[in-house]
Structures are given as structure tokens and as C-alpha cells.
């Protein structure tokens, strides 16, 4: 899950990376379309002038759906938000994506206005104007996070009422609806219930089986007048709290909207993003997913000899305690992307592969996968193996030309007990059998041709069959000597499939 209290703007030194590849969603930009100067810039100036006049406690930020308060929703707006207790400034711009909202905020859209509340709904044009390879769901999530961060930075006292992206397409199976649902499921965690409020009434725009009817959205995207009536009604309790007229923050009363996303599956096989990736400045955690996407963008060739996928055991190739020096020495001349993320479970790797973009738009010859050790505490061996199998399948579909080195879980001695870490060998003996069972189950995934079993287990065990503390000093993570063992075992595969360097 996301860290619910973390909304961090991670946009310093933003750079536009070449030809529609990479983090466009977090890079402030003007619309690239020809009508920018005919509509967009004049509207920007108009709204900036209105903001300069003052008198607005509420600002609506968004795209054409928000812009539509001035067309299909004009009568509803006049009745609810033009004057009176909810007087608001509509800063919805047709065609806008997250990067355009960022540009507007960066260039004085609100002048010296100090709103007490923002209403934010954005993202449908990120998914609607770009394919999933150009902008995976992770990038749209990062774009929304960036806007929230900008608002927190510039208007720390203001409440933000965050909406999910509204339903799009006739049915739950509409591809754009599915992409938006993936985003919606994750951005909800940005709402802490105090400064950022989650206002979800999507189910009220749909029939019980998830159909978006033209009576509410004539073009299956933009609400009609009836849709704006529902929006106004749902929004007012949140505005009352944001403006100090109600002492208690409301909660979304509507039932979750029907989606086509899989449900009822074991956690280990259900793709989920992880809050760790998004960064936490209070804990000095860097936004790794954004940094890794930026690393991809800087790779003009869009080619890697190898991509390493996993959890902290893979992530720590980058640790500055001798591990990174081993990496640099052993793999000199090879271009390798480290896609290991500390704390990841199988479901997090599955998200990153399917929706994170790290295997999109690039080509590689070799991929390594080692995942599952963090699942050990909660999931059964069978569920962990199923999660790893799902990861293998997804990787093969994304990069079918690459050889996949499937690694068993490295021996682990650390066990969790009542929230604390117990390093005793006794508890290690409790963990190892489950790992051994997982490894036995996943070995059959390797066909020896496209998926190769890459087993280092024996190299990391001592004479008693326990994790060797000389290579795994904390019982889990290799030290420089352990990474040297790993590197020496991996090098022959690099030379075979990528050539000697």
C-alpha cells in the first residue's frame, strides 16, 4: 500500500526526455496541439485575471470534464458554485493532462489567490491520449501525486478534495476504463482524510453492473447536466468540511464502482503498487520508481544487456558498502538496469512488470528474477509460487526475445515475530522449509531454453545447511562477498547471450 500520509512533490530538475518516452506525466508542459494558442493560452490568461481579482475560496482543477461546468453543467454551476457559500473558480481546461496542470500551477495560474479548498479530478487524458507503453498507469499515478505535492507545497493550509477519474467507456471492460480503474485503485491512498479527502461517487454514474449510460454521459466520457447534478450534490459535504462549516470530514457514501479488475485472487497474484516506490521525504526515502523511469529515459538506445528484477536483495546491488563497487567491476561494459525494489512482494513485481513501464519501450537480451522472500511471512508456499509464476508469464509476454534466469529464493534466516526481527537460527529453521517448498514448486517453470533455472542456493549455505553469515551477514542480504559470488555466476550468461565485454 501507499504510505497514506505521504504526498511528496518529486519534480526537481524536471527534464523532457525524447519523443514520447518516459515521465511525461510529471514534466510540466504546455499542450502540444495546434489549438493551444487558440483556446488554451487565452483561457489561462482569463483564469489568471479572475484569480487576481480574488473572492474565491474554492478552485476546481482538471480537464474537459471540469471545463464542462461551463457548458453542459452551466446551469448546475450557476445554481451551486457561481455565487453564495461555494463560490468557486473553474480552472478545468479541455485536453489537459497532469503535466499541463503542473505547468499552470508553475506559471501563476492562481496569481496571489489563497484558496481554502481545491477540487481535483485529472488523468483521463493521460490514459486516453497515450498508449499504455508510452504512459503506464504508474506514470499517471505519479502525475497526480506531483499535482498534490505542488498544492501541498504552495497551499499548505488548503484542503484538497481528490476524485477518482470518472467512468469512461460503456462497460467495465472498456480498455480505457480498465486503465483508469487501475489508477483509481491506487491514488485513493493519497487521501489522508484530513488535508486530502477522497470523494468517490463513480458508482452513482453507473448502473449496478457498471454500464455508463448516455443519459448521464452522452459521449461516454463527459457528464451531461444530470451528471453534474450528481457531482454537485456529492461534493457539498466535502466543501463544508474544507471551508470549516462542518467539524467532521465526510467519507464516500457511495459503494465502490464496478470494475473489470480481478478480485478474489490471492494477494500474491494481484498486482499492486507499493508506497515505497513513491518516496517519503520524512523518512529520507527517495522516489525509486520515478528515478528508475528517468534512468530509462536517459537511455537513448532503449537497450539493456540485462534487467535485474526483484526485491531488496536485487536493489542492494546499488548499496554503497562495497556492493556497488562489485557491480561496477564485474559488469563493466554491460548496460544493466537494476529493477530491484526494497520490500517488494510478488504482487509488487507483477504491478511493475504489467503497469510500471520498466519493461516497456526497451529491449533486452537477459532478465533475472528473484522474488518471494517478503511473501514468506504471510502467504502460503503455493500462493507465493503462483505469484512467481504470474511474474514469469508477464515478463515473458513483455520481453519474449529475452532469456529469463529464474532464481530460487535465497536462503533466509530472519523471521518476524510479533512485529520484531528475531535473528536466531531456530527461527531460521522455521523459514527455510517454506522457502524450499516454494523453490521446489517454481523450478518446473524453467524449460531450460527461454526460462533458465539459475540456482545459487548451495553457494549461500554453510556446512550446517543454514544461511552463511559470511555472505549473508543479516541472514537475508548479501554483502560484497556475496554479491561477488552472484556476479561470478551471472557473468557466463551475460557473455553467452550478450557477448564478452
Image: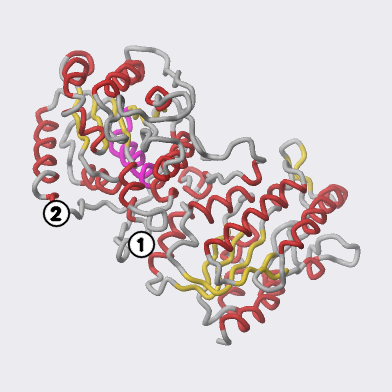
Mark 2 secondary-structure assignment: helix
Is disc 2 in contact with disc 1, using a CB cutoff of under 8 Å? no
| C-alpha distance separating marks 2 and 1 | 21 Å
Q: Exactly how many numbered labels are in the figure?
A: 2
Label 1 sits on a secondary structure element that is loop
- Is residue 194 shown to the viewer in this render? no
Q: Residue 318, position in %: x, y?
A: 56, 65
**Residue density around tag 1, few if under 14, some if 14–19, many if 20 or more, within 10 Å:** many
Against 196, residue 274 (above or below) is below
- Please state which of residues 28 and 402 is positioned toward the viewer in this rendering: 402
Q: Quadrant of residue 8?
A: top left
- Residue position for label 1: 21
Residue 156, compared with residue 319, is above or below; it is above
| Residue under the image location 59 percent in, 36 percent down | 263
The residue identified by callout 2 is: 34
- Residue drawn at the location 48% of the way across and 45% of the way down: 280
Magenta portion: prevailing SS class: helix
In the picture, the disc for residue 409 is none
Along the polypeptide, which appears first: circle 2 or circle 1? Answer: 1
Between circles 2 and 1, the one closer to the viewer is 2
Residue 172 image position (x, y, % from top left)? 45, 36
Going by the image, does 205 lie left or right of 428? left
Q: Residues within 10 Å of mark 2 (few under 14, many from 20)?
A: few
Residue 240 percent coordinates (x, y):
32, 15
Q: Quadrant of residue 45?
A: top left
Q: Which residues are magenta?
A: 143-158
> In what quadrant of the picture does the N terminus appear?
top right
Point out the residue furthest to the right here.
Answer: 464
Amino acid at each position: 500500500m501507499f504510505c497514506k500520509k505521504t504526498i511528496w512533490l518529486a519534480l526537481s530538475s524536471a527534464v523532457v526526455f525524447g519523443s514520447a518516452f518516459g515521465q511525461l506525466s510529471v514534466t510540466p508542459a504546455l499542450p502540444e496541439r495546434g489549438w493551444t494558442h487558440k483556446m488554451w493560452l487565452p483561457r489561462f490568461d482569463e483564469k489568471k485575471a479572475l484569480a487576481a481579482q480574488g473572492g474565491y475560496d474554492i478552485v476546481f482543477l482538471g480537464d474537459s470534464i471540469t471545463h464542462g461546468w461551463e457548458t453542459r453543467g452551466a446551469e448546475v454551476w450557476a445554481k451551486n458554485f457561481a455565487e453564495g457559500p461555494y463560490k468557486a473558480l473553474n480552472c478545468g481546461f479541455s485536453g489537459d493532462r497532469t503535466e499541463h496542470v503542473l505547468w499552470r500551477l508553475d506559471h501563476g495560474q492562481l496569481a496571489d489567490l489563497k484558496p481554502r479548498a481545491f477540487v481535483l479530478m485529472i488523468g483521463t487524458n493521460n490514459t486516453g491520449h497515450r498508449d499504455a507503453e508510452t504512459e503506464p498507469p504508474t506514470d499517471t499515478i505519479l502525475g497526480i501525486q506531483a499535482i498534490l505535492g505542488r498544492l501541498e507545497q504552495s497551499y499548505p493550509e488548503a484542503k484538497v478534495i481528490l476524485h477518482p477519474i470518472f467512468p469512461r467507456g460503456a462497460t467495465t471492460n472498456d480498455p480505457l476504463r480498465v486503465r483508469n480503474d487501475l489508477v483509481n485503485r491506487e491514488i485513493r491512498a493519497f487521501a489522508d482524510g484530513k488535508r486530502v479527502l477522497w470523494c468517490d461517487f463513480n458508482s452513482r454514474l453507473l448502473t449496478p453492473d457498471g454500464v455508463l449510460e448516455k443519459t448521464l454521459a452522452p459521449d461516454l466520457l463527459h457528464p451531461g447536466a444530470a451528471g453534474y447534478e450528481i457531482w454537485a450534490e456529492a461534493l457539498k459535504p466535502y466543501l463544508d468540511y474544507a471551508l470549516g462549516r462542518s467539524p467532521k470530514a465526510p467519507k464516500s457514501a457511495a459503494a465502490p464502482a464496478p470494475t473489470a479488475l480481478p478480485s478474489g485472487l490471492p494477494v500474491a497474484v494481484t498486482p499492486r503498487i507499493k508506497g515505497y516506490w513513491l518516496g517519503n521525504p520524512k523518512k529520507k526515502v527517495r522516489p525509486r520508481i520515478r528515478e528508475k523511469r528517468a534512468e530509462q529515459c536517459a537511455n537513448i538506445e532503449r537497450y539493456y544487456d540485462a534487467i535485474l528484477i526483484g526485491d531488496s536483495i536485487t536493489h542492494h546491488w546499488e548499496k554503497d558498502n562495497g556492493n556497488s563497487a562489485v557491480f561496477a567491476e564485474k559488469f563493466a561494459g554491460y548496460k544493466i538496469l537494476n529493477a530491484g525494489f526494497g520490500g517488494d512482494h510478488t504482487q509488487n513485481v507483477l504491478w511493475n512488470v504489467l503497469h510500471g513501464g520498466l519493461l516497456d519501450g526497451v529491449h533486452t537480451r537477459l532478465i533475472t528474477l528473484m522474488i518471494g522472500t517478503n511473501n514468506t511471512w504471510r502467504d502460503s508456499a503455493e500462493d507465493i509460487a503462483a505469484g512467481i509464476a504470474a511474474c514469469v508469464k508477464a515478463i515473458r509476454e513483455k520481453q519474449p526475445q529475452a532469456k529469463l534466469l529464474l532464481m530460487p529464493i535465497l536462503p533466509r534466516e530472519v523471521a518476524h515475530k510479533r512485529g520484531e526481527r528475531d535473528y536466531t537460527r531456530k527461527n531460521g529453521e522455521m523459514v527455510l522449509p517454506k522457502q524450499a517448498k516454494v523453490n521446489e514448486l517454481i523450478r518446473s517453470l524453467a524449460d531450460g531454453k527461454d526460462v533458465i533455472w539459475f540456482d545459487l542456493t548451495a553457494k549461500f549455505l554453510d556446512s550446517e545447511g543454514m544461511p552463511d553469515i559470511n555472505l549473508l551477514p543479516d541472514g537475508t542480504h548479501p554483502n560484497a562477498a556475496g554479491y561477488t559470488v552472484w556476479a561470478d555466476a551471472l557473468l557466463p550468461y551475460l557473455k553467452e547471450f550478450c557477448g564478452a565485454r
